[in-house]
Structure formats: structure tokens, C-alpha cells
Image (spheres, helix red, strand yellow):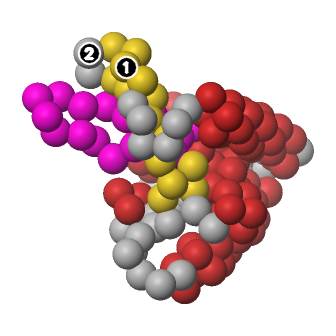
Amino acid sequence: MPESKEPVSSSSAWPPMRQPLRWLWVAVAVIVLDLATKALASSQLGYLQPVEVLPFFNLTLMHNTGAAFSFLATHPGWQRWFFALIAIGASVGLTIWLSRIRADEKVLAISLPLIIGGALGNLYDRLVHGYVVDFLSFHVAGWYYPAFNVADIAITLGAIGLIWESIMGDRRRRKAHRTTA
């Protein structure tokens, strides 16, 4: 019987990762670091009073009732619960995804908890304060990038990892299939 020339899917090429939920420690670390830095910023910085660290970087305490780039921040308050539901749904979905990853998906094993931790760090702020605490502010030539926090950094790094895994993971699986075929 001739061998199949179809590409091998990740589900058949690699065994499931043993104990993938152990990677949730990354999410816990993100949450702890995020909440600690937000508490420090809130206790040490005056609201909207920039503290110059570098010519292009300030620590500036801000409260964001919206999402990324203050999306929906000007609305009357419903967005708090909308973004909370998104954070909860995304965290549950990503945790389920994490529980099903394969042994070769190490980047994915780190990326998913980074996003989960960032989402839950910002969720805490939304539920407790009604806004997200932001304090990292970059600027150049009078243009200011929207302020952000450690949770936002984790979400961004996790998203980059997902993109990386979607591109490089497919290549890795094809290469592994060629070497075993």
C-alpha cells in the first residue's frame, strides 16, 4: 500500500503536551507583576502628571475606561461590562486551547498564558476600579503613543507569539514530516 502524500496535521504528528496547564504559572506571574506595578504607579504618581524617565518616555498615571487606544472610553459605562465579558471569555477559551496543545508548541505554551494573564490583570482593574490603570507613556516630537501597562505588554507579546507559531509552527511540522517520510 503506498504512503499518503497528504501533509501531516499537528494533531497526528506530535503527541499532546504533558501537563500543558502547568504553563498557567506564566499567567499568574503576569497578573502579580501587573497588579504590583499598577499599585506602585497609583501610589507614587500624580494623575496625569508626567515624570520624565527618558527624553521619549514618561511615567504618567492614567485611567482608561475603554480598551486599547481608549477605544469606547467616552461611552457611559456599559463598555466596562462588555470588556469584562470579553476578558473572561477569552481567558476561558485560551485556557481550553492551552489544555490541548501539542508537545512541539512551546511558543504557544508561553503565548497563551501571557494573553490570559494580561486579560485577567486588566479585568481586575475593570471590576475593582471601573477603569484600567495605565502608566507607561512613550512620545516623540510631540506625538504620544497611548499609555499602557504590564498587562498590555503581556497581551502584545502573546499575540506576537501566536503569529510566530502560526507561521513557524507550520514550517516546523512540514519539515518534520519531510524528515520522517
- In the rendered image, is residue 51 in sight? yes
Q: Which residue is mark 1?
A: 52
- The answer to whether residue 60 is left or right of residue 115 is left
Kind of element beneath mark 2: loop
Seen from the viewer's position, the closer of residues 148 and 118 is 148
Which stretch appears magenta?
134-150
Q: In which quadrant of the rendered view does residue 39 lie? A: top right
Residue furthest to the left in view is 141
Image quadrant where residue 141 sits: top left
Q: Residue 34, percent across and down? A: 67, 39
Neighbours of disc 2 within 10 Å: few (<14), some (14-19), many (20+): few
Residue 112: % across, % down: 64, 49
Can you say which quadrant of the picture contains the N terminus?
Answer: bottom right
Mark seen at residue 62: none
User: Was residue 70 drawn as part of the magenta stretch in this picture?
Assistant: no
Residue 167 image offset from top left, x and y in percent? 39, 45
Report crowding for label 1: few under 14, some 14 to 19, many 20 or more residues within 10 A (C-alpha).
few
**Residue carrying label 2:** 55
For the residue marked with disc 2, what is the amino acid? Pro
The answer to whether residue 175 is seen in the rendering is: no
Proximity of marks 2 and 1: CB atoms separated by less than 8 Å: yes
Residue pictured at 26% horizontal, 21% vertical: 56
